[in-house]
């Protein structure tokens, strides 16, 4: 973890243990640092798993194997390596992942496809198999640890440990979801990677867990952006041990399905926001709310065009209510928009309505809003019922310093 | 013009007059500055015109009218206002453009649709009609001026005047193309706008001129990016007076058509490169060359994904051969790519081939190349024959300073 904590950081929440999940950490020494960098989670037999993965076609072997193995629906272990992403390493990278899966599955006595592996850090360097083997050996005999230890261990250039939790009543029982995530810090030649893990004692069928996770990711992880650059290793996995004793949720009609889905989306949104709050150089957390689009999908694409615009992000960094740049970003999104129906606001105050600056626009409340840390940009397209909210951070000198002020 | 000239600036070339084109400049006073800010060009009767315009759907009235009027194929005058883009100004902005077209067409005695107007600068403020009227009156009686005066007058936050020329032999006669362009400097709340104008004495039919200009723009202007943000006012117009006396070029089979097309593309490429060389905060000029893609269009989209990646652009700013970030950008482009066939190089030296870092990779020549001002990134996809080159600049503290370090 870096010394300079993000000004947008949140304290790590108090989170209970999840029955059927045991956490351990160890030091594999992937980098020359004096901290644990290998996280090992073991799950009770019968634990369901679901996952969403990067769409980057140059993804790592970890992502390829995870995407394939999540389909069989069961997980017994998770290994997370920090300090080396093992991406773009060809057959040697693949061999390293195979070796980890073989070592852990032999220890547990389970099929190797029930062992999930993630790696984050430098790209283009095969994960050293000897360090991984020794690290796992050490983890297997380490004392169990808590969520914050695990959250710190999966981090690379993150500036704070990130965790979230939620509860729901399912079938008369209180079920718990806990989660940790890392991202989106980065120091060259490392590549930002978002790795998120959700753990629950809820009994739920893997197929339906996958359906709910994919839907939640669309509204949360897929609605955040720090710099528009999609990592080769992004992974979010959900593990459900079933130890809460509820009747298994198999479909949307089952008792507690809606409550569980809401809690899952809540946890995913918390995690997604935490990643933005640790965005490189971030000084402000920005929510872009788009209404009146022709569809929700169109609203999201327009929101992302705004959230990815360097000119909008630098304007917010400068606390400048530059709604002209928002107009530009709407117009370049490639989505239906009518300039003369477009309205733009900041912090709930309209600056422009129906394609023109407001005659009586009072910039004082907007200027006050922009001095804060939590910024909202409102865009109404006046065309339909489509809506979406996306989240990002501002673009500052800190981003340039982190990513340009060095030689590798 | 700004005081701090881009380190990538080029001297203004010596450019001859074009028969049938008269240039004049005046001071309309759109901003509180002591410089000319209104450019007036008058063309001989029968001058052909063609144009390409921004795809931003929130475009200005100038763009809407230009796109419509270029279809009738003839131009007698061009007016360029600097300091106010007149974009997002509703009916008042439209009235201001109509008034300019009426004033100039009455003076010349031509249809108003043969008067083309461009504006660049602050967004959301209707162009003041009285200042425009007085500015045009002053321009109409001013002494004719040269290309560099015009190039300076159309600029806003540009740091140097940008011009280009080429010649071709058509039908036994030497024809000349001259051109000026402004962009892509920007100081809030101004919006970057690329305005480019090409003038030639060649006799050429408007429809065919349009065909050639669109094709040239696809390979030049549409292959550059500074920050991925598409302006509401981008415009490139080509005017052909026909005074060279060649037999009119009507189609690709006509004598001299290929020579003219090559000269036009040459001028467009020069202009496009000059815009990148004045990119905000630019310290390095970057050419991204993509080969082996499934098609030329796919190669261009991959090239733009690389050229728009903040992580790639900051790596180049840091003189860091971070080919992992290039891999990431290829993978996020949404185009066909095979990680295990991908090769990445800098300055002609491969860093990674066929999905793996080169075992004998010598970083010394790459490091030396990256210390220079003119950088090349080579990407080979190993899939097909598609190829494209796109151009951009690095992303530096200067960009943040220009766009964030102020309050409007």
Image (tube, coloured by chain):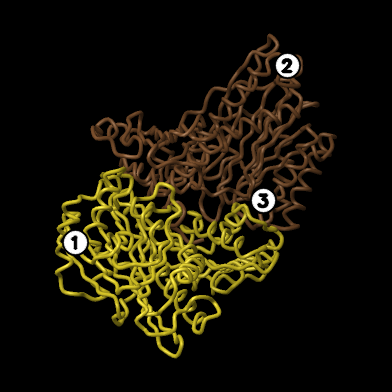
Chain colours: A brown, B yellow
Circle number at residue A378? none
Crowding at mark 3 (Cα within 10 Å: few <14, some 14-19, many 20+): many
Q: Are marks 3 and 2 in contact (CB under 8 Å)?
A: no
Where is mark 3, residue-wise?
Answer: A59
Between B18 and A111, the one lying in front of the other is B18
Question: What separation in Å lies between label 2 and label 1 (alpha carbons)?
Answer: 74 Å
Where is mark 2, residue-wise?
Answer: A254
Looking at the image, residue B307 sits to the left or right of residue B51; the answer is right
Question: What separation in Å lies between label 3 and label 2 (alpha carbons)?
Answer: 36 Å
Q: Are marks 2 and 1 in contact (CB under 8 Å)?
A: no
Indicate whether A344 appears above or below B188.
above
Chain identifier of the residue bearing label 2 in the image: A
Task: Check if mark 3 and mark 1 are on a common chain.
Answer: no
Circle number at residue B136? 1
Indicate whether A23 appears above or below B164.
above
Q: Is mark 1 on a helix, strand or loop?
A: helix
């Amino acid at each position: 973890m870096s010394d300079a904590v993000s000004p947008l950081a949140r304290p790590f929440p108090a989170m209970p243990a999840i029955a059927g999940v045991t956490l351990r950490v160890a030091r594999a020494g992937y980098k020359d640092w004096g901290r644990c960098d290998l996280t090992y989670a073991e799950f009770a037999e019968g634990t369901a798993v679901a996952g969403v993965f990067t769409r980057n076609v140059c993804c790592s072997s970890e992502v390829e194997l995870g995407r394939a193995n999540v389909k069989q629906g069961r997980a017994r272990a998770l290994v997370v390596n920090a300090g080396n992403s093992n991406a773009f390493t060809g057959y040697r990278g693949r061999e390293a992942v195979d070796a980890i899966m073989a070592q852990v599955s032999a220890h547990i006595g389970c099929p190797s496809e029930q062992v999930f592996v993630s790696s984050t850090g430098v790209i283009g360097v095969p994960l050293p198999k000897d360090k991984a083997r020794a690290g796992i050996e050490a983890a297997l005999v380490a004392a169990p640890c808590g969520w914050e230890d695990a959250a710190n261990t999966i981090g690379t250039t993150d500036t704070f440990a990130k965790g979230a939790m939620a509860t729901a009543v399912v079938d008369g029982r209180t079920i718990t979801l806990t989660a940790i995530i890392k991202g989106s810090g980065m120091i060259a030649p490392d590549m930002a990677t978002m790795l998120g893990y959700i753990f629950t004692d809820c009994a739920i069928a893997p197929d339906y867990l996958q359906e709910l996770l994919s839907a939640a990711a669309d509204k949360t992880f897929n609605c955040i952006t720090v710099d528009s650059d999609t990592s080769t290793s992004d992974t979010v996995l959900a593990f459900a041990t079933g130890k809460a004793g509820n009747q298994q949720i198999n479909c949307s009609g089952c008792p507690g399905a809606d409550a569980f889905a809401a809690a899952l989306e809540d946890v995913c949104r918390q995690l997604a926001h935490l990643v933005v709050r640790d965005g490189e150089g971030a000084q402000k957390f920005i929510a872009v709310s788009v209404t009146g689009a022709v569809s929700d999908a169109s609203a999201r694409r327009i929101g992302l065009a705004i959230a990815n615009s360097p000119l909008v992000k630098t304007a917010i960094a400068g606390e400048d209510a530059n709604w002209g740049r928002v107009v530009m970003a709407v117009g370049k999104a490639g989505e239906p928009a009518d300039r003369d129906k477009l309205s733009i606001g900041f912090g709930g105050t309209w600056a422009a309505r129906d394609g023109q600056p407001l005659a009586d626009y009072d910039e004082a409340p907007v200027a006050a809003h922009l001095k804060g840390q939590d910024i909202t940009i409102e865009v109404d397209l006046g065309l339909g019922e489509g809506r979406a909210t996306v989240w990002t951070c501002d673009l500052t000198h800190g981003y340039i310093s982190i990513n340009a002020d060095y030689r590798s």
